[in-house]
Image: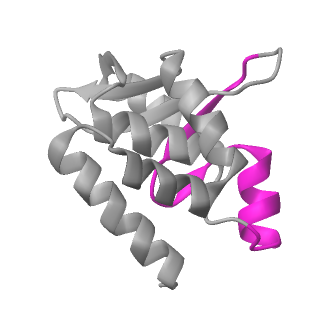
Amino acid sequence: MSASNLVAESVWKAIESTHSVNEEQLSVLHFLFGKNFEKATRIVDQRGVKKIIGEPSGRSILQVVGESRRKEEYLCFADNYCACYSFFYDIINRGEQLCCKHQLAARLAESLGACVEVKVSDEQLAVLLSEL
């Protein structure tokens, strides 16, 4: 794991423990993620992160709205996957970013307890996951 990932992980853990973000943490996240962090905060502010929870298992996945006019929604595992184009192009292929704005929004919303929770059956969750 890179030094940047380790720093980011320690900041996320601190945010998760308090469910709030202080100025120093904001500065670090902005330094690490730049424009993507700004975009992610807009998504969270607009309540664009859904936590889809399967019942009765309690398993979940995050769905994050995009910023384009079409308002696509991307399934996302905050730590390691997003279904968006940027994830595959900028992160996987080029290795230029630590994560995409959707992953950042998902992680931030989860850390702050700001996800919109949607309960579905485990079968519906399985169908969603099969589309990945």
Q: Does any portion of residue 130 appear in the rendered image?
A: no
Q: Where is residue 41 in the image (x, y as percent from the top left)?
A: 54, 32
Is residue 77 highlighted in magenta?
A: yes
Question: How does the figure colour the protein chain or chains?
Answer: one colour
Does residue 47 appear to the left or right of 59 in the view shown?
Answer: right
Residue at image point 24% right, 47% down: 16
Residue at image point 38% right, 26% down: 52
Camera-nearest residue between 97 and 121: 97
Magenta segment:
71-96
Q: Is residue 66 above or below residue 12?
A: above
Q: Is residue 50 above or below residue 13?
A: above
Q: Does any portion of residue 57 appear in the rendered image?
A: yes
Camera-nearest residue between 67 and 23: 23
Q: Position of residue 127 (x, y in %)?
A: 49, 30
Q: How many marks?
A: 0
Does residue 92 appear to the left or right of 49 in the view shown?
Answer: right
Does residue 19 appear to the left or right of 116 in the view shown?
Answer: left
Q: Position of residue 56 (x, y in %)?
A: 16, 27
Is residue 49 highlighted in magenta?
A: no
Residue at image point 76% right, 70% down: 96
Q: In this view, does 101 lie above or below 126?
A: below
Residue at image point 45% right, 58% down: 79
Does residue 66 appear to the left or right of 125 in the view shown?
Answer: right
Please tell me in which quadrant of the rendered image residue 74 appears.
top right
Q: Quadrant of the C terminus?
A: top right
Residue, far front: 23
Camera-nearest residue between 93 and 100: 100
